[in-house]
Image: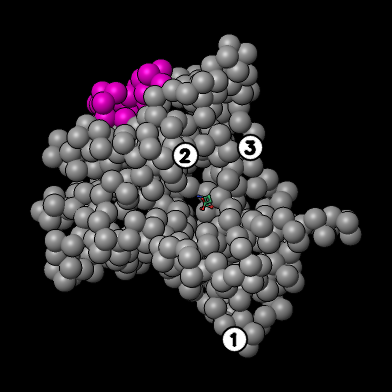
Amino acid sequence: MNEKIKFEKYLSERVLKLEESPTFALEKKVDALDSQLKEKGSYVVRFGIGQPDFNTPANIKDAAKQAIDENKTKYTASTGIKELKEAILDKFLRDNGLEYTTSNIVAGNGGKQVLDAIMRTFVNQGDAVLVPRPYWVSYTQQIVLSEGIPLEIDFNENLKIDMAHLRSLIKEHGRKIKLLILNSPGNPTGAVYNIEELREVAQVCLENDIFIISDEVYEKFIFGNSRHISIASLGKDIKDITLTVNAVSKTYAMTGWRIGYVAAHADIIAQMTKIQDQSMSNPCTPAQWAAVEALNGNQDSVEKMRLEYEKRRDYIYKRLNSIKGIKCSLPEGAFYVFPDVSGFYKGNVKNSFDFSSELLEKAYVAVVPGGAFGDDRFVRISYAASMDKIIEGMNRIEKFCKSLI
Ligand code: GLU
């Protein structure tokens, strides 16, 4: 073909409409800047993409090495090996009080791929999916990829679903709404839903035949008196309409291993399995064995990481609120803070995208603009970074903010 050919006219509307992932786009930019800075003896403080700075625990790495040595390197069932499904069943029972059988489980290539397969399983062209703002960046785009329509729900003063707005969206869009995405502890807010709030959401969904995707990947990182509750554990009827998504990525510092999973009604799983068969074959086999060890093995490393995240949260929250012009609420979980920086919007800095790119270019600190999560007043700071880096990053942010006043 001619070099000047306009490829776009041959490509699908679906892909052309899709936005780039802001977290991954930022990583590319930061990698490039960081290597330039390294030559000058400097570096970027990375508060961007949400991934644990800890290494995968040794027992988990050993299990993967052993699997490779034992030639456990072939195709498996597309939804995962029996041993992994059993480890997942034990986890749901132990941690969430949820009883399932292997016919209720799909293990896939990370929580993200599992979520995408769920969208494809449910969403017809023009179907609506309720997404509470602020939301993780890929939810809305995965809906778009399935040719559905994301319906954004406003949030209340606790950064959680505004129930009156949820009800009015249901009234307006009625049966076009198929799904609601719940994410507690939440990315980017760190907000954790309590039992009364979960009951209210469950009730509304039951009354209106709306299925719930409950993304619980941050369940283990919860602080103070907060407690994680799986919405599916609130009763049989709610369990039947809930797809509980989780992953080993955050809990065990295994982001690159790509193992996530979902538990749902067997009839949903049977249909979703066809998608896994046709699009993914199976999640990486040695990584599945590593995940078996992660879920069944000693859990001490998880508590160690949680304690460290809590210390960091407390520090960063105090530092942020001491900066004139920043307002930040205390997150109860995950490893993000979501400060309101809109007080600095003037001149060149008109929005969260400008604020983040100025902060990166001038102060060498990477954060994700709140606009990417559906609210432009904020930026997201991931504190999955060492305490040294957090102190340095906060010093840089403080100085940068002073320069904007
Ligand atoms: N979930 C992480 C984040 O929000 C990983 C990046 C991504 O998949 O978007 O940063």
Q: Tell how many labels.
A: 3
Give how far across and how far down residue 58 sits, in percent.
63, 23
Residue topped by disc 2: 110
Query: In the picture, which quadrant includes the N terminus?
Result: bottom right
Residue sitting at x 68%, y 74%? 358
Query: In the picture, which quadrant includes the C terminus?
Result: bottom right
Q: Is residue 233 magenta?
A: no
Task: Point out which mark residue 54 bears.
Answer: 3
Q: Secondary structure at mark 2?
A: helix
Principal SS element in the magenta part? helix
Q: Residue furthest front?
A: 1
Residue 299, visible in the rendered structure: no
Kind of residue at badge 1? Lys
Residue sitting at x 13%, y 40%? 237
Q: 10 Å neighbourhood of mark 3: few (<14), some, or many (≥20)?
A: some
Residue topped by disc 1: 346
Q: Secondary structure at mark 3?
A: loop
Q: Vertically, is 131 above or below 252? A: below
**Marks 3 and 1, Cα distance to the nearest angstrom?**
38 Å
Residue range of the region highlighted in magenta in the rendering: 81-105
Lower position in the chain sequence, tag 3 or tag 2: 3
